[in-house]
Image (cartoon, helix red, strand yellow):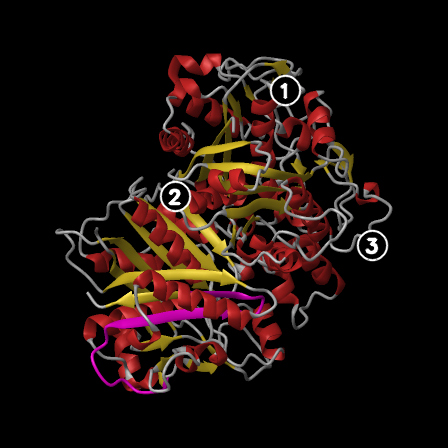
Amino acid sequence: MSRLTITGIGSVTPIGIGKEELRQSLDEGASGLARIRKFPSPLKTPSGEIRDPGLDKNMAARFRRVAAVSKYALSAVDMAIKDRGLPFPGGNETALVMGLTHGALTYTEAFHGSLLREERGSASPLFFSDSVLNAPAGNVSICYGIRGPVHTLVGGPATSLKALMLSMRMANSGEVAGAIAVSSEELNELSFSCYSRLGMTAISEGAGAVFIEKDGPETTSRYCYLSGAASRCCPSDPAEALQGAIQQSLDEAGLTTRDIDAVMTDTLPQALTRFSNATPIVTLAHLTGSAFSVNAMWHIILASMSLQGGALPLSVIVAGRQTGDLRHIMVCASESDGVGAAVVLSKT
Amino acid sequence: MRNPVVITGIGLVTPLRPFDGLQAFWEALCSGEDAIKRAPAPLLDTKKNWLMAGIDLSLRPPKDADPGNKLFVIAEAALSMALHNAGLRNATRPAPLTYSSLLNVGLVTGTVLGNVLLKESRLMDTGKGNPGDDNMESLSSLRSYLASKFELSGAGFTVSTACASGTDAVGIAARMIAAGKCDVMVAGGADVLSDFALLGFSVLQALTDDKVRPFDRKRTGLALGEGAAFVVLESLSHASARGAGIYGSVLGYASRADANHLTGPHREGRGLSEAMTAAISDAGLASADVGYINAHGTGTGYNDLMETKAIKNVFRKGAYEIPVSSTKSMLGHSFGAAGVIEAVCCLLAVRDGIIPPTINFTEKDPECDLDYVPNEARNHEIRTAMSLSAGFGGQNAALIVGKG
């Protein structure tokens, strides 16, 4: 049976746009965190901002007006499609699943603001239509002619993994020839203020996208196989939910914790005790900040690059150490309301 | 689909007889009762009474506590009703659940605006945010609340595909069971009326100031509504093993995108046609097997014409033989709840052999020339029915249900 393969990746991060810039920043241990500049704020809390003014220069005019969350998604998907190195099937043959947490907060606030200021007759329809949570997926679908299933999942840090799983299910069932899983977020003045006051020290923005399809003779680009995936919910015990998801994903992959050569996560250390102390624990968060659901997608991209290249960048290992070849990497995430998700990626 | 999937529980709270149960809702709907009335916007003083279908929380049973957050109240009531209806919850005890395998039951929730009233209240009160607001205002807060309240510990997520959210929630959950990933899932949708939606659709000039008249030549737009609806989905083998009552089967589902425009449908109904064709194929049926279509039927000029063209494109001459009705003519458009409510209408139509009507239908549109079941319900034996949804972002979804 053909295995599911990641064949294209695209990333928009505070430490670089695209895999080459990302890899270079990781090798250098460069941080993307700095005081916010995209809106005025008295807070000195560092954040991970996308500072590429030319990000939309190649986009059609209709997409230059869309919310930042859509622009980041469009850029990441564009890179993933090109990175795959084959003509894009598009049409009914491709699915798109977006995972996000907040969506177009800036346009949402702008539309609400115009209502409160009693400018109802002159409120921009764009602020309304682009505020809807599935607008980023809609914009990507329109831009690339994706006419298969287009879904948007909304939630916390595990949501992009769930988007990946739904993409895997559709590609695996043969419903589509390929599926794109994407996650995107934008920094917003209100959420920046709220999360800063909650003590969350470095929130960020950006996007990540991966192209998934069954391995085949025509496949030219193989980053890694997707060997197992699972999610669980246990509202009374988030750690148990994550433990359950980890075990179920390992079972699906036919592996044990001893087979996992690195764990990429921003989450609950108590759920990781089953792994050996020597297992490298990897995160991007100290370099990129937290872009909510996007971080797990960045981890998927980093895992894909690492499995293909054979080594983890030293700058992202926060515990343990890499001792041998990378064969299997687990990416996992959990949410405070009891959701846990885990994906196992394996060397091709 | 591989493992047969059946529906064993239904719960809903709609503007029609909101807290009177499933049968009262169905009888009111089939009698053509119109829940769309004039009312002020929920929060803002817009100096206008808007046509909309709202749920009057004062109609809740007196024993129930303070209503609090409307979205959570109606969603909790609908989900509780669905679990009880499926025999998975003891009616006299809110928790814990009486059925141990509920620990592996997942929850898929569809919503478009989620807890939007909380956000609007906060913005109006202070114009600023408070720490923690973002979590409660998140669309996924509803799913978190319900999963915790009912101890639903299986896999699940919040899906937001605009007005197709509810249909996609049911379809994706059914696919998970069909693929053998789980035995039981609860899926549904919920949304409430908000100033954001009212003013937003007003800016888009999509709201009617007349009656909602889907497919009528004089149709002038839609009316917004609100509601919550959930269904309990099970593998046939699981439902049979525990002796559950079965409303019907989920036979097929498909989602397709227009890839055309963010707010307007593809004028020829390309995406909706493709969703219908794929759902019929998924069900292993021929188009002639579909006995009833519950249309998206919003009452806007563009939607109803697009939908008519899409149905004719798929069913060809047979399109004229299929009853097509819009229950939004009575319930308004309840966003994420709409697709689930309409799937329930399809199930009950199959069960009872009654097609609910499209009300306020007075004048045929030469371009919308199908059988829209005008104004009166019709006795009509059918074995399968299809529910259609379409929404912003070019979303389209089709769900086919049949006799159990």
Q: Which residues are magenta?
A: A318-341
Residue at mark 2: A149
Residue B218: image location, x then y, percent? 61, 19
Tell me which corner region of the image, top left, top right, bottom left or bottom right, holds residue B151.
Answer: bottom right
* Chain letter behind tag 2: A
For badge 1, the amino acid type reads Pro
Residue B47: image location, x then y, percent? 79, 43
Looking at the rendered structure, the secondary structure element under dot 1 is loop
Please tell me whether mark 3 or mark 2 is closer to you in this view: 3
Q: Residue B66: which disc?
A: 3
Left or right of A16 on screen, residue B232? right
For badge 2, the amino acid type reads Pro
Q: Is residue B33 magenta?
A: no
The answer to whether one can see residue A161 in this image is: yes
Image point (18%, 60%), residue name: A221
Residue B115: image location, x then y, percent? 65, 55
Residue at mark 1: B357
Q: Is residue B65 above or below residue B127?
A: above
Q: Are marks 3 and 2 on the same chain?
A: no
Image point (37%, 75%), residue name: A264
Query: Hey, which residue is sitting farthest left in the picture?
Result: A217
Q: Are marks 1 and 3 in contact (CB under 8 Å)?
A: no
For badge 3, the amino acid type reads Asp
Mark 3 nearby-residue class (10 Å; few <14, some 14–19, many ≥20)? few
